Image: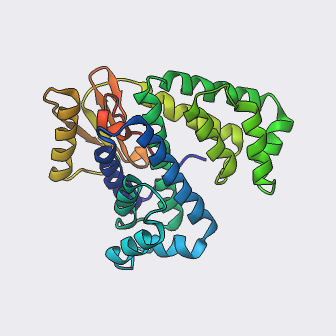
Amino acid sequence: MTMTFHAASREALVAAELRLIEVIDGAKADALSTLGTDLFGVLDLLSRESTLRRTLADASSEPAARARLLRGLLEGKVSASALDVLDSVVTARWSNPREFCDGIESLSRTALLARAERDGRLDSVEDELFRLGRIVAGQPDLELVLSNPTGDRAGKLALIDGLLAGKVEPVTATLVEQLVGLPRGRRIVEGLEELAGLAAKRRERSIAYVQSAVALTDAQEDRLSATLTRIYARPIALHVEVKPSLGGGLVIRIGDEVVDGSVAGRLDAVRRELAG
């Protein structure tokens, strides 16, 4: 189940991704893991609390009121950087609650993949996700257990932990645990393939050719150019192409590097196809 976004959500995701780039610019590696897990924790909460989910995604309400509600619930329970990113999420206009949650999930995964990239382990994460997908696909009984929407969540997490413990990168384990614990309509093999694809896209290296699901404002272009220039320690010019088929988010290619918009901060791979 690939994420797709309507127009309002595409704009909201671009704004949130740009904020994420700024938040993780220069952040320590451990902070990226915390940011990713905190964002996913909020997604988990919203998946269980339908009233809260609808309230925070309600485009007809006052954005500042949504931000106050969010901070009142989460202040002191998640990192300051997670609150900062979530502020940009809840004050934006999303097409519907589902896409609101999709955006948070996308941001969470981006932060975690940025951690692997920061550690120079993104290749390993991609390979592990791909190989695990093939292993599960080759064991129908295992896939059935892990994909069962009515199965015991704790039991499924214990099973996957037993399979992965000490055998894969920490980021790989976290991403897989999140998928198993909250598949959001995906079968496990499908979800693993999607994750491996996100890691692969992030690994591609390229130049400052920017593809965006929606047109960036002059201010957004200026901010992104300044961030990339600071990260690469050389002037970075933007060539922006509007490409609605992305579904949401940004793809930024710098030179031979795929600059994953989410890697922000050290963005030497800022290609953010974060919401495919």
Image coordinates for residue 31, horizontal then vertical, percent: 41, 42
Q: Nearer the viewer, residue 46 or 81?
A: 81
Image quadrant in which you'd find residue 227: top left
Image coordinates for residue 266, horizontal then vertical, percent: 30, 33
Image coordinates for residue 234, horizontal then vertical, percent: 14, 26
**Residue 4 shows up from this direction:** no
Q: Nearer the viewer, residue 156 or 221?
A: 156
Image quadrant in which you'd find residue 257: top left
**Residue 40 shows up from this direction:** yes
Image coordinates for residue 45, horizontal then vertical, percent: 58, 63
Q: Residue at (41%, 39%) from the top-left corner?
A: 273
Describe residue 117's horizontal placement relative to residue 196 as left or right.
left
Question: How many numbered discs, if any?
Answer: 0
Furthest toward the right, the residue is 141
Rendered position, 71 above or below 197 = below
Q: Residue at (47%, 55%) from the top-left corner?
A: 104
Q: Residue at (36%, 78%) from the top-left corner?
A: 65
Furthest toward the front, the residue is 76
Task: Give the colour scheme of this rendering.
Answer: rainbow
